[in-house]
Every structure is written in structure tokens, then in C-alpha cells.
Image (cartoon, grey):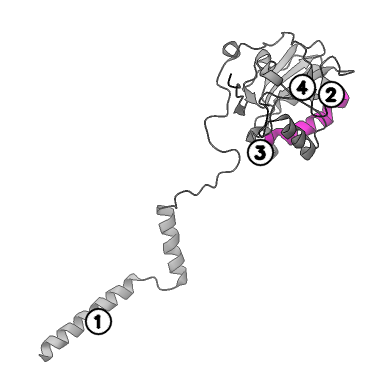
């Protein structure tokens, strides 16, 4: 009986020693083990992405021919659209213009929001030189976050220094061939289209922009030159045609 009891006790002590050897020795080891588990099995549902959410490529996919809008060198038809201050704005109504930065944008697209401050800066820099920003919302409809009233509130919140016009009936954006928000069309004094596309090469991070396509195009016109490049792919949310 004594031999049996001694054998049981020996087995218990041996198991305890093995168990202790497998445990982390201190809190640092515990943290290290937990971090290793997180690295090997990250928690589901966690999203640390910065910038606009996923949901398809933000890059324009159709060519100008497929879009069937304006091409470089074509004269854009003037429009007469309601501004957020209630006035009607046309290109002809803008005095002393050397050109026009016609930009299709909206209230809620994450890319449109990312570019708002840059559009404000562009207008503040170039309107006095004869190149004002004219923003047009092609998604505006009665009620909702893209309504005229919501446009007025957005312009007030951001203190837009430029005209923010509503494309009622979505008649203007198809003429231009805008497909994303934002989508820029730089016109010269005669309303000839000189540049089509994106504002710069980094939608998500203004501090990391390397090429300012739109600004370079304006400078080219100022110097009597043709913008190069004069076409880039727009980056933003697809414009949504209203349901009939």
C-alpha cells in the first residue's frame, strides 16, 4: 500500500512540474503569448483602414468615347443653374473670367469630402486670376442628404467661397461626360475644354500629393500652352442617375 501511495504522489509531482514549465514565467511572457495569438489569429470585424471605405474601384473605368461627353478642344454649352444662395449662375454671368474650373461634386461621397478643402484653396488662389471654381452637384434630388437644402447646409458648414449649383433633372453632367465625384473640366475663356480628370494624384492624402494635374493645367493656360497631360482618370464615387 505504501508503494502505491508513493507512486501516486510521484506522478502528481511530476505532472505539476511539467505544467509549471509550460506556463509563462511572468506578465511580460503572458503579454508576448497573447500578442502572438493575436498575430496568428487577428480578431474579426476590426478595420484599421484610413480614408474612404471599400466598395469597388474609385477610378474611372470608361473612356471618353464610351462616356460620350466632351472631348478636349470642344466648346462646352453654357448652363444656368441655381446656386445655394438662390441666385442663378451661368458661365456667361461670371465677369472677367479667363477660364472655368467646372467641378462635379456632391455632399456625401467620401472622395468629394476629401477634396473640398483643396477646391476651396484652388478657388481662393485662382479666382482672382480669372479661374473660378464652379461646383455642380449632379446627385441632388428632393429630400435626403443630397437635397438642395442639404447642399445649402454643406456650403454653410464648409464656408464655400465658390458657387455650388444644383443640376436639377441631371441635364448637365451627361453633356460634360462626368462620371465621378469629383470630376473636373477646365475650360478656357472661349469655353473650350482644355483638361478633364482628377485634381491631383493623391485623393486620400493632400500632404502626399506629388502631381497637381489641375493646377499644372491652369498654369499651362496662363503661359499660353496646352496642358500636358490634358486627360487623367477621375477618382471618386460614381454619379448616380435618378430612377425614372
**What residue is shown with label 4?**
101
SS class, disc 1: helix
**What residue is shown with label 3?**
205
- Who comes first in sequence, dot 1 or dot 2? 1
| Quarter of the figure that contains the N terminus | bottom left
* Mark 4: few/some/many CA within 10 Å (<14, 14-19, 20+): many
- Who comes first in sequence, dot 3 or dot 4? 4
Cα distance in 3D space between marks 4 and 2:
19 Å
Characterize the magenta stretch by its predominant secondary structure. Answer: helix
Cα distance in 3D space between marks 3 and 4:
21 Å
Numbered range of the magenta stretch: 113-130
137 or 17, nearer to the observer? 137
Cα distance in 3D space between marks 2 and 3:
34 Å
Among the 4 quarters of the image, the one containing residue 152: top right
- Who comes first in sequence, dot 1 or dot 3? 1
Residue 13: which numbered mark, if any? 1
**What residue is shown with label 2?**
87
- Who comes first in sequence, dot 4 or dot 2? 2
SS class, disc 3: loop
Cα distance in 3D space between marks 4 and 1:
82 Å
- Who comes first in sequence, dot 2 or dot 3? 2
Mark 1–mark 2 contact, CB under 8 Å?
Answer: no
* Mark 3: few/some/many CA within 10 Å (<14, 14-19, 20+): few
18 or 88, nearer to the observer? 88
Farthest right residue? 96
| Residue depicted at x 69% and y 33% | 107
SS class, disc 2: loop
Amino acid at each position: 500500500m505504501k508503494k502505491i501511495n508513493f507512486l501516486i504522489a510521484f506522478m502528481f509531482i511530476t505532472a505539476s512540474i511539467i505544467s509549471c514549465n509550460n506556463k509563462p514565467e511572468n506578465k511580460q511572457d503572458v503579454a508576448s503569448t497573447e500578442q502572438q495569438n493575436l498575430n496568428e489569429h487577428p480578431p474579426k470585424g476590426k478595420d484599421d483602414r484610413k480614408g474612404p471605405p471599400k466598395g469597388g474601384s474609385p477610378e474611372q473605368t470608361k473612356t471618353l468615347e464610351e462616356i460620350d461627353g466632351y472631348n478636349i478642344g470642344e466648346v462646352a454649352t453654357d448652363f444656368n443653374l441655381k446656386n445655394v444662395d438662390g441666385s442663378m449662375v451661368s458661365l456667361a454671368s461670371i465677369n472677367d473670367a479667363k477660364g472655368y474650373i467646372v467641378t462635379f461634386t456632391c455632399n456625401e461621397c467620401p472622395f468629394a469630402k476629401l477634396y473640398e478643402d483643396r477646391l476651396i484653396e484652388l478657388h481662393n488662389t485662382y479666382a482672382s486670376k480669372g479661374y473660378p471654381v464652379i461646383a455642380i452637384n449632379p446627385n441632388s434630388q428632393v429630400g435626403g442628404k443630397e437635397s438642395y437644402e442639404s447642399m445649402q447646409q454643406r456650403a454653410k458648414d464648409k464656408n464655400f467661397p465658390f458657387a455650388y449649383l444644383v443640376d436639377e433633372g441631371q441635364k448637365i453632367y451627361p453633356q460634360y461626360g462626368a462620371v465621378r465625384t469629383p470630376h473636373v473640366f477646365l475650360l478656357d475663356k472661349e469655353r473650350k475644354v482644355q483638361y478633364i480628370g482628377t485634381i491631383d494624384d493623391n485623393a486620400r492624402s493632400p500632404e502626399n500629393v506629388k502631381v497637381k494635374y489641375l493646377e499644372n493645367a491652369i498654369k499651362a493656360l496662363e503661359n499660353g500652352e496646352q496642358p500636358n497631360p490634358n486627360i487623367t482618370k477621375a477618382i471618386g464615387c460614381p454619379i448616380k442617375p435618378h430612377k425614372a
